Amino acid sequence: MSGHSKWATIHRAKEVTDAKRGQVFTKLASAIAIAVREGGGTPDPNSNFKLRLAIEKARQLNMPKENIQRAIERGTGGAGGANWEEVVYEGYGPGGVAVVVEAATDNKQRTSQVIKTTFDRGGGSLAGPGAVAFQFEKKGLLTLTKPENIDEATLRIIDMGVEDVEEAPDALEVYTKPEEVDLIKRKLEEAGFEVLNFGQEMKPKTQVEITDKEKAKQILSFIEKFEELDDVQRVSANFIIPDDIIEQLTS
């Protein structure tokens, strides 16, 4: 979930904590299995950039090798992975914010019911395909440790052929074409930058600012309920919350 506020910082820290607890391994395994299936069932990361990213992400978060191998086997149709598929859900959250939920599942009926229930209970509503997706753009996103000289670093990064560089409170966010994440990651690391996180995301074209504390609390809870679901890979929403509201909610 993107947004240039302290929420983005908290969200990144939470991912690291969850990884230490092993809570993200299920999601990582699903991402690997889906990448294999989308690549025609061939478990070759050299010819499948999505699989290459998924495996690299799993390694970054210290996922055991045997878990990675089992996920690859699921993607090729083994280990119960024959019905594995990626599903995208669109809808509205509290305050009418647009929400896109990307899931990986081997039981679409089960997952669809859980997603619908989560929308309903959180004060939102599930919509049909295409209802809100047009409000987002698929991008590659790499998060970097914030350098001392932001301007100089930004110019160096732009020269690498990226689409945009944005400053966040705790990091630099580098946007690329989705299929160029691994290429840009290598360039950044070769240039001495520390890449904290990388992957693909649905970036909102415009954002709705939430200035009401209770509404902000409701929206954050709504998003977190989706992220806690094992089947959910990524949640994107077009809201941003001012830092002072985030501080009040997390203090």
Image: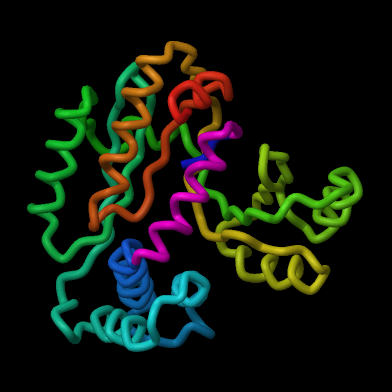
Residue 17 x %, y %: 43, 57
Would residue 23 be found to the left or right of residue 205 on screen? left
**195 is within the stretch colored magenta:** no
Rendered view: 100 above or below 110: above
Q: Main secondary structure of the magenta part?
A: helix
User: How has the structure been colored for display?
Assistant: rainbow
| Residue at 23% across, 34% down | 128
Residue 40 is drawn in which quadrant?
bottom left
The magenta segment is 4-21
| Residue at 67% across, 43% down | 170
Residue 195 is drawn in which quadrant?
bottom right
Instruction: Report the front residue among 178 and 71.
Output: 71
Residue 158 x %, y %: 81, 52
Residue positioned most to the top: 212
Residue 120 x %, y %: 15, 28
| Residue at 33% across, 88% down | 66
Instruction: Report the front residue among 228 and 102.
Output: 228
| Residue at 80% across, 61% down | 160
Residue 90 is drawn in which quadrant?
top left
